[in-house]
């Protein structure tokens, strides 16, 4: 007599619920089932990096740069020569209206746009002993020593007189009645510019390096008559 009970194989279970083990798909059965359709998701492919400066580009750049520099070197000086510019200090006329012209014996007036002082001397002998017929005199502000700009010092007292042109660089000192050098390392008195008096009593002063007149001890005698 057999005591073991036989499980029914497949098919009808007799209406009885199957056990959980029986519900699990067997591996063999899963392989036979149809594969679910898959969707291909596009994946971005990295773009290969391009070299910023290739050898070809480098050689070409070097070639054109060299050629351009050579051309500039050849043509540049000629163009520079052809288009001349007005150099600093070139001759230039400066107009001064009658209102800006000092009265005889007044302190010098600076005409900044022309870098000169305008003097109006009284006829006679200057306090420094030079003779003058009186009139206008234009003195360049540039110191004859090393070129510093010379100011007029109305408060500067020297040799018992007040009011001098005195260079701040090395102390050259010039009279206000003609720019005569009385002290300091400058080689000569202050340089002059020529003056033309106009019909309307204005004046034109010819300024610049090329037209400057070398200063000398007779500066006060170089005045231009002015009777406005
Ligand atoms: S530059 Fe004027 S004294 Fe030297």
Image: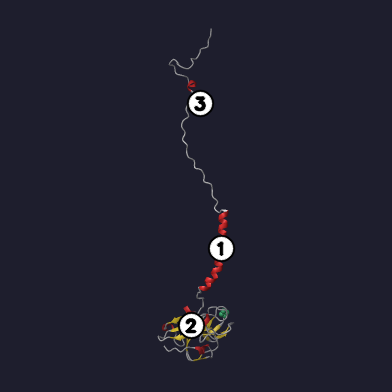
- Mark 3, ligand 1, within 8 Å: the answer is no
Most distant residue in the top direction = 1
**Image quadrant in which you'd find residue 172:** bottom right
Give whichever of 103, 224 is nearer the camera: 224
Q: Closer to us: mark 1 or mark 3?
A: 1
* Distance in Å between CA atoms under marks 3 and 2: 113 Å
Question: Mark 3 = which residue?
Answer: 31
Residue occupying the point 46% across, 86% down: 196
Q: Reply above or below: 24 against 148.
A: above
Question: Mark 1 = which residue?
Answer: 67
**Residue 101, which numbered label?**
none
Q: Do the CB atoms of the residues marked 3 and 2 lie less than 8 Å apart?
A: no
Question: Mark 2 = which residue?
Answer: 206
* Distance in Å between CA atoms under marks 1 and 3: 75 Å
Q: Position of residue 162 (x, y in %)?
A: 51, 85
Most distant residue in the left direction = 200
């Amino acid at each position: 007599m057999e005591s073991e009970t036989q499980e029914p194989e497949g098919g009808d279970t007799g209406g009885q619920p199957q056990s959980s083990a029986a519900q699990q798909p067997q591996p063999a059965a899963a392989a036979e089932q149809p594969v679910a359709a898959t969707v291909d998701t596009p994946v971005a492919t990295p773009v290969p990096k391009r070299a910023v400066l290739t050898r070809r580009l480098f050689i070409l750049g070097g070639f054109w740069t060299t050629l351009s520099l050579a051309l500039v070197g050849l043509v540049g000086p000629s163009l520079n020569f052809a288009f001349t510019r007005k150099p600093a200090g070139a001759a230039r006329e400066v107009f001064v209206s009658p209102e800006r012209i000092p009265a005889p014996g007044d302190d010098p007036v600076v005409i900044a746009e022309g870098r000169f002082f305008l003097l109006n001397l009284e006829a006679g002998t200057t306090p420094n002993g030079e003779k003058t017929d009186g009139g206008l005199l234009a003195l360049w502000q540039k110191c004859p020593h090393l070129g510093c700009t010379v100011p007029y010092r109305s408060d500067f007292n020297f040799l018992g007189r007040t009011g001098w042109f005195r260079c701040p660089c090395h102390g050259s000192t010039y009279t206000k009645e003609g720019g005569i050098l009385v002290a300091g390392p400058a080689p000569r008195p202050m340089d002059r510019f020529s003056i033309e008096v106009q019909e309307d009593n204005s004046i034109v002063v010819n300024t610049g390096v090329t037209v400057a007149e070398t200063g000398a001890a007779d500066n006060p005698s170089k005045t231009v008559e002015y009777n406005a």
